[in-house]
Image: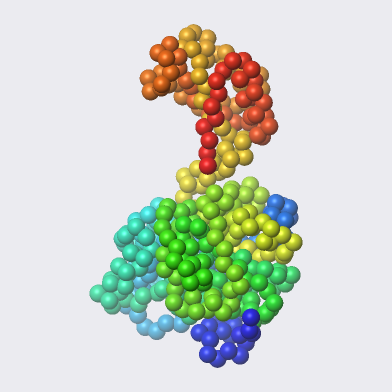
């Protein structure tokens, strides 16, 4: 890749990013970049994590939003379309600077993000199911009301602001040889890529997308792939990549990968368990890439960006419990038994003998294909590990019970 220090024709340069860094200094958090020994052991790479979830609005989007606000002229107010983090960053800094802000959000946006955006003083308009629908409506409102539209990613000032993440990261962890960056519209990886390829032309820049929304992945390969679905990584659920960001990405990004929903969920859970920190789906997608493509990154020194922590608490609870089930520590066992006194006790006694905690019991007599004198129970239970759970299953079968684990995929 070429160096961008003297590229006058390029839409964003490292000088733009450095100017943005000076502009926003003191108004955004200079977040830490820390070595994670445990994630390194889990993935086989040396893993550094930049904790952008420690920003005031819990996401890196503040950087670009503030840089844009500080470089624009007089305005009656600003308007944006966002699934959440750009909304909060823009709303927070607009209020701080005395600029009215209107945010158009998809109806599917997590409630926590809507509430937090309103809490920062913005007027929230819910429209459409996806970002693209909200985006079109925001442009319409901007024209009708005379507001300045602030694009979440396809704007040089936004891209330059997001690039400040790389300036800090490569200063704090100069050993990084591979940056793994989640991609929605592409503003973050475009800005970071310009910085990385200017400071360290040999560094590898790898983008990651959720497999349900592979728009930039497909664009880089000149392919047509379906894009849609209910992803946990709604912050990067963009059907159409930016025109400006695509131009930059083709120059500064070495590879683009996709990851399944299951690995994104696992990454969210790992960050809670290992780093004791909360990541939204989009924020954990970089780590998901190391899980999905383990051999691709083995032995490398990888920089990950925990780009945001705004996840709905109920969704986070669901993700953590699903991960426990996949590990075999939480299970639902469907057990057939005769509908007579003492039958349930005989099952529960085996759970007690194996020190397995029972969380819930569901008794079903009516909606079952079993004979009228039989029934089945679903028991949700918790064990230390998968081995302990397996011994319970064997004991139940040895006692003559038909046991059917209810799988999670």
Residue 182, percent across and down?
55, 64
Q: How is the image coloured?
A: rainbow
Would you say 81 lies left or right of 314 here? left
- Residue 107 occupies quadrant: bottom left
- In the displayed structure image, the side of residue 240 where residue 296 appears, left or right: right
Q: Residue furthest front?
A: 223
The mark total stands at 0
Measured from the top left, where is residue 179 in percent x and y?
64, 68
**Residue 250 is drawn in which quadrant?**
bottom right
Observer-nearest of 48 and 370: 370
In the rendered image, is residue 23 in sight?
A: no
Instruction: Identify the residue at the far top of this view.
Output: 341
The foreground one among 344 and 84 is 344
Residue at (41% x, 58% y) in the render: 228
- Foreground residue among 114 and 240: 240
Q: Quadrant of the N terminus?
A: bottom right
The residue at 55%/57% (across/down) is 259
Q: Looking at the image, which residue is at 74% across and 61% down?
A: 299
Q: Residue furthest left?
A: 144
| Residue found at x 41% / y 22% | 368
Measured from the top left, where is residue 93 in percent x and y? 45, 70
Tell me if residue 304 comes above or below residue 316 in the rendering.
Answer: below
- Vertical position of residue 56 compared to residue 337: above or below: below
Q: Where does residue 61 sit, x and y in percent of width and height?
A: 50, 68
330 left or right of 69 in image: right
Residue 372 visible in the picture? yes
């Amino acid at each position: 890749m070429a160096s961008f220090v003297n590229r006058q024709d390029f839409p964003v340069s490292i000088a733009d990013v450095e100017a943005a860094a000076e502009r926003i200094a003191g108004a955004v958090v200079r977040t830490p970049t820390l070595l994670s020994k445990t994630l390194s052991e889990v993935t086989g790479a040396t893993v550094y994590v930049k904790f952008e979830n420690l920003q005031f609005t819990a996401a890196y989007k503040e950087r670009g939003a503030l840089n844009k606000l500080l470089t624009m002229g007089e305005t009656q107010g600003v308007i944006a379309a966002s699934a959440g983090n750009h909304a909060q960053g823009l709303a927070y800094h607009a209020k701080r600077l005395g600029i009215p802000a209107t945010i158009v959000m998809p109806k599917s946006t997590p409630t926590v993000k809507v509430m937090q955006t309103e809490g920062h003083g913005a007027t929230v308009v819910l429209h459409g199911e996806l970002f693209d629908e909200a985006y079109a409506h925001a442009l319409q409102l901007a024209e009708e009301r005379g507001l300045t539209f602030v694009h979440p990613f396809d704007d040089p000032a936004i891209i330059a602001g997001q690039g400040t993440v790389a300036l800090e990261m490569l200063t704090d962890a100069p050993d990084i040889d591979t940056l793994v960056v989640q991609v929605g519209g592409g503003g973050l990886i475009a800005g970071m890529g310009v910085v990385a390829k200017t400071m360290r032309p040999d560094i590898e820049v790898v983008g990651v997308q959720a497999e349900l929304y592979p728009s930039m992945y497909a664009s880089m390969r000149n392919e047509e792939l379906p894009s849609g679905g209910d992803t946990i990584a709604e912050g990067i659920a963009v059907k159409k990549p930016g025109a400006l960001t695509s131009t930059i990405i083709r120059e500064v990004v070495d590879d683009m990968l996709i990851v399944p929903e299951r690995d994104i969920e696992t990454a969210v859970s790992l960050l809670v368990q290992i780093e004791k920190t909360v990541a939204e789906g989009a924020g954990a997608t970089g780590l998901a890439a190391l899980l999905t493509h383990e051999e691709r990154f083995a032995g490398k020194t990888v920089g990950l960006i925990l780009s945001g922590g705004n996840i709905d608490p109920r969704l986070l609870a669901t993700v953590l419990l699903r991960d426990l089930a996949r590990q075999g520590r939480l299970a639902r066992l469907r057990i057939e038994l005769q509908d007579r006194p003492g039958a349930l006790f005989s099952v529960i006694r085996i759970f007690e003998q194996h020190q397995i905690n029972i969380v819930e019991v569901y008794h079903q007599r009516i909606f079952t294909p079993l004979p009228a004198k039989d029934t089945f129970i679903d028991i949700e239970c918790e064990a230390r590990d998968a081995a302990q759970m397996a011994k319970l299953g064997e004991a139940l079968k040895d006692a003559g019970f038909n046991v059917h684990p209810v799988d999670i995929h």
